[in-house]
Amino acid sequence: MPALCSNCSEKRAMLKRPKTGHSLCKLCFFFAFEEEIHQTIVAAKLFKPGETVGIAASGGKDSTVLAYIMKLLNERYNYGLKLMLISVDEGITGYRDDSLETVKRNQQQYELPLKIVSYEELYGWSMDAIVKQVGLKNNCTFCGVFRRQALDRGAIMLRVDKICTGHNADDVAETVLMNVLRGDIARLRRCTAISTASEGDGVVPRCKPLKYAYEKEIVLYAYFKKLDYFSTECIYSPNAYRGYARTFLKDLESIRPSSIIDIIHSGENLSVREGVKMPVQGTCSRCGYISSQALCKACVLLEGLNRGLPKLGIGKHHRLHEKILSQQPLTENEEKKLKSGDF
Amino acid sequence: MKCAELLFSGQKVHHVTLPSQSEPCEYHQKKVLLFLLEKCIKTKFKQAINAVLLRPGILVLINDADWELMGELDYQIQDKDNIVFISTLHGG
């Protein structure tokens, strides 16, 4: 028989919180979990009364819990926010079509308006079609870059002031590790930020209210509350680098649960020495989206797809971008390098 | 690896009767897990063992309570216990 709740000492404890080590009953856990997210929102001043906030909703556990809690806290604490759901349809048969059904049910359950934007309509390419061309390596690069922009486009169509995403503590810690492993200093510096300021036209500020919430607690919250969510892993993701960082992180967590929050803490307090070269943010000369190059990553990837040269956006081919911009023909050798042969 | 039920031949709920206890030996979680695995998993055997025993991101609930409160693998299974495995994999 498990012990009693260490908070109310009345009911049976139902879980051990990884962050604090406390054993709590369902009700005390719900309260603590919700209050911590409220504290995160208040401390970081994520929202202002009267704002319209788009919740990036995939139908997965994180965004479902996010939508549920945002609605709950908005009512409990009178945030004065207008909430909406924004979903991206990547066009992945057998995965996203099913998860979007979950989002549509959430729309009913939480009575929030929903907007779905699709890769097909924005880019003319679904992920199914992209994978057919590029295979199962680097396909996540296309998906990630396109999704970021798709969410912004959806947000602009809905005229929302901010987007919030369901990134949890485990996600942030994974990203810190990945950026360390890749030596990506620019991303390492910004990946722990809880919110991004508007970086220019066409980019909507984003925030992560679940930044300090453990995945384990999110899953248990959804399970105990019987929230309706979709839990299949993307069929195209098995080769993604993130998976290795994730497994490593889970191993660390099983030895010492605070590892996750400790990695985030380390990431937050890193400072980059002066004189380290950082990319300068500009705008894409084709679509106007933020970019540190002449062409943004989405435009380069898309150009590669449309020309049958999918490797164009993978790795460094900056010199070729000017040729593309000025519509000069590529040499045979350059074309050969960018074809999908050794993908 | 996909959701946990895919490892168990796509079936979501399993009613398992453990071999009767001739001697008063107690069933430990580990034995039950191995029994479950043998009985229910027809494919991807190795993956499944890794997933459940080493559980990179699989939560185990015994009668709806976190098994970390119950001594994990040392917990003695009682009659009519309900054991739930939840995958924490990304659906994002």
Image (tube, coloured by chain):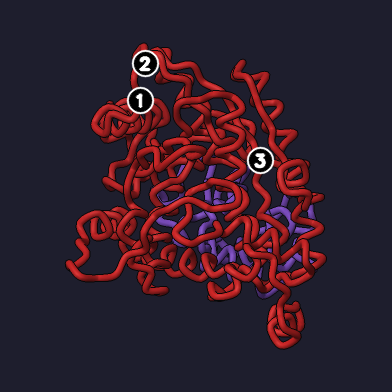
Chain colours: A red, B purple
| Above or below for A257 versus A156 | below
- Report which residue position mark 3 lands on: A88
- Residue at the image position 75 percent from the left and 85 percent from the top: A332
Along the viewing direction, whichever of A245 and A139 lies nearer the viewer = A139
Asked if disc 1 and disc 3 are in contact, CB closer than 8 Å, the reply is: no
Along the viewing direction, whichever of B15 and B55 lies nearer the viewer = B55
| Above or below for A317 versus B79 | below
- Residue at the image position 73 percent from the left and 80 percent from the top: A335
Horizontal side of A305 relative to A148 (left or right) equals right
Q: Quadrant of residue A26?
A: top left
Q: CA distance from mark 1 to mark 3?
A: 23 Å
The chain ID associated with circle 3 is: A
- Report which residue position mark 1 lands on: A47
Determine crowd level at label 2: few under 14, some 14-19, many 20+ residues with C-alpha closer than 10 A.
Answer: some
Q: Amino acid at mark 1?
A: Phe
- Report which residue position mark 2 lands on: A79
Q: Which mark is in front, 1 or 2? A: 1
Asked if disc 1 and disc 2 are in contact, CB closer than 8 Å, the reply is: yes
- Residue at the image position 54 percent from the left and 37 percent from the top: A63
The chain ID associated with circle 1 is: A
Mark 1 element type: loop
> In the rendering, at what x and y percent does residue A41 appear?
32, 30
> In the rendering, at what x and y percent does residue A139 appear?
67, 65
For residue B13, say whether it is visible: no
Numbered tag placed on residue A168 in the rendering: none
Q: Amino acid at mark 3?
A: Val
Horizontal side of B31 relative to B45 (left or right) equals left
Discs 1 and 2 carry the same chain letter: yes
- Residue at the image position 37 percent from the left and 73 percent from the top: A183
Q: Amino acid at mark 2?
A: Tyr
Q: How many marks?
A: 3
| Above or below for A196 versus B1 | above
